[in-house]
Each structure stands twice: as C-alpha cells, then as structure tokens.
Amino acid sequence: MTKFFHRTDPGHGWVSVPRKLIDKLGIAADITPYSYQKGGTVYLEEDNDASTFYDAAVAAGMTVEFVTTYTDRTPIRGYASYTVTAPPTPAAIRAIVPGDRLRLRNEFKVGTLTVTHRGRYIVAGGYQIKPGQIAEIIAA
C-alpha cells in the first residue's frame, strides 16, 4: 500500500504526488492548472485531478491510501500552477539576463515578458517575478 497526503485547508484540499509518478502513470497531460507544483511534487486538487490520479494508480495495480492533514493556512495556494512541462532548473533561473523573455505560469500575467532588470530580483513587464512563476525561459 502506498500512502499519499491529502492536505486540506478551510476551503479546499490537494493530494501530494511525486511528479515522476504522474509521468510514469501517463496522466501528466490530464492534470488541470487547478493543481499546483513545487519542486518534484504536484499537489493535485481534490475535485478532479486526485480522482484522475487515483483511477490511473489503481489501474496500474497500486493500492493507494490517502492520509488527510488539516491546516488553517496552507502554503500550497502560493505554489505555481501545474503545467505539463517541468519548471526551469535553479541553474537556468540564475542564468537569466536582461533581454531574455519569460513565459509565466501565473494566469494573471499571460504571454511572454522581456526581462528588463536582473539584480536580486528578476523584473519583467514591470512585475517582480518569482522563480516559481516561470514556465519557460526564452534566451535573448
């Protein structure tokens, strides 16, 4: 039996699953942007994506158990929205220079933005960009 944590807050819940397992099960393209990701973990939203994962895991012969934990304020809501492609590596993010273009994950900043300043922070399109918001780096 494999245990997965079902993390909940007052409004919603997510099941934390290693990205490699999602890829191995062949469901990466079926996960919605309502799930989140950080590092090698994907936090599957409980209404749809967790069911997609559960069905695929059982079909692959896994025995799955969800262990629920509750917190009033979860950091999950601040993680990057899920995308099929893995986020850029820390080394790639450190190599960003002015003139590079960034495609962001954040639904409120759509499209690509050109980096105008690179110091302690990355500034593009007048926004201070967090590394977790970067979906793709397009070199100048």
Image (spheres, helix red, strand yellow):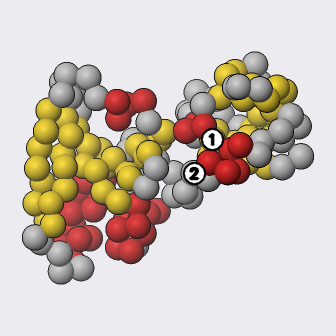
Outermost residue to the top: 126
Q: Looking at the picture, how far across and down is residue 52, in whole percent?
A: 28, 61
Quarter of the image where one finds residue 125? top right
Up-down relation of residue 95 to residue 116 (above or below): below
Q: Looking at the picture, how far across and down is residue 71, in whole percent?
A: 18, 28
**Proximity of marks 1 and 2: CB atoms separated by less than 8 Å:** yes
Give the alpha-carbon distance from disc 1 to disc 2, as whole Å.
7 Å
Mark 1 or 2, nearer chain start: 2
Q: Residue at 26% of width from left, 70% of height from top?
A: 56
Q: How many marks?
A: 2
Residue denoted by label 2 = 87
Q: Looking at the picture, how far across and down is residue 89, in whole percent?
A: 61, 53
Quarter of the image where one finds residue 108? top right
Q: Amino acid at mark 1?
A: Ile
Dot 2: element: loop
Outermost residue to the bottom: 61
How many residues crowd mark 1 within 10 Å: few (<14), some (14–19), many (20+)?
A: some
Left or right of residue 12: residue 36: right
Residue 111 in sight from this viewpoint: yes
Left or right of residue 120: residue 78: left
Residue 27 in sight from this viewpoint: no
Residue denoted by label 1 = 134
- Rendered-image quadrant of the N terminus: bottom left
Of 20 and 113, nearer the camera is 20
Q: Residue at 56% of width from left, 58% of height from top?
A: 85
Up-down relation of residue 35 to residue 73 (above or below): below
Left or right of residue 113: residue 56: left
Q: Amino acid at mark 2?
A: Pro
